[in-house]
Image (cartoon, helix red, strand yellow):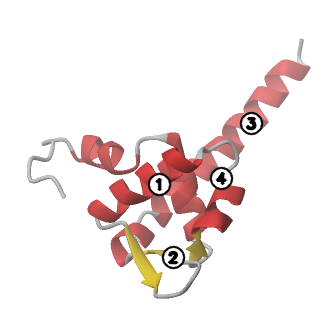
Amino acid sequence: MKKDMPACPVEVTLMLMGDKWKILIIRDLLEGTKRFGELKKSVSGISQKMLTANLRAMEECMLVDRKVYAEVPPKVEYTLTETGYSLKTVLDSMAEWGESYKRQAMVQSSAF
């Protein structure tokens, strides 16, 4: 985890989860532990390279735990940490706002 954090708490939050892929990964891990392949399928449009990079960054920031099983082929599972799970309220607020916006946009577009 980086020692130098922005002074603004909103900026800190954006630093940790401010890209679309991280938000979608968190959304899917809120349902529970997932394997890499399950995340790849559920986060539509993400490349394997991008998923790997985001999971590593999230692990470094202590949002995700990675558990590797000594099997062939290798089995790796990802789980939100307590800190990662605490972002649920942020995602819930985003979902609520998004639903409200969609309703408003539909009403406005039907008025034309």
Q: CA distance from mark 1 to mark 2?
A: 12 Å
Q: Dot 1 lies on which element?
A: helix
Q: Which residue is mark 2?
A: 76
The residues bearing labels 4 and 2 have C-alpha atoms spaced at a distance of 17 Å
- Residue located beneath label 4 in the image: 43
Q: Along the polypeptide, which appears first: circle 1 or circle 2?
A: 1
Q: Residue at x 61, y 44 (%)?
A: 46
Q: Amino acid at mark 1?
A: Thr
Nearest to N terminus: mark 2 or mark 3: 2
- At label 3, which amino acid type do we have? Lys
- The CA span between labels 2 and 3 is 37 Å
What x and y, as percent, mark residue 3? 9, 53
Q: Quadrant of residue 67?
A: bottom left
Callout 3: few (<14), some (14-19), or many (20+) C-alpha neighbours within 10 Å? few
Q: Which residue is mark 1?
A: 52
CA gap between label 3 and label 4 equals: 21 Å
Residue drawn at x 14%, y 47% is: 5
**Residue picked out by circle 3:** 102
| Amino acid under disc 4 | Val
Give SS at disc 3. helix
Query: Which residue does the image show at 37% across and 58% down from the upper left?
Result: 56
Local crowd size for mark 4, using a 10 Å CA cut-off: few (<14), some (14–19), many (≥20) = some
SS type, badge 2: strand
Q: Is residue 41 above or below residue 19?
A: below
- Horizontal side of 15 relative to 44 (left or right) equals left
- Assess disc 1: are there few (<14), some (14-19) or many (≥20) residues with their C-alpha within 10 Å of its C-alpha: some
Decide: marks 2, 3 in contact (CB < 8 A)? Answer: no
The mark nearer the N terminus, 4 or 2, is 4
Whichever of callouts 3 and 4 sits on the residue coming sooner in the sequence is: 4
Foreground label between 4 and 2 = 2
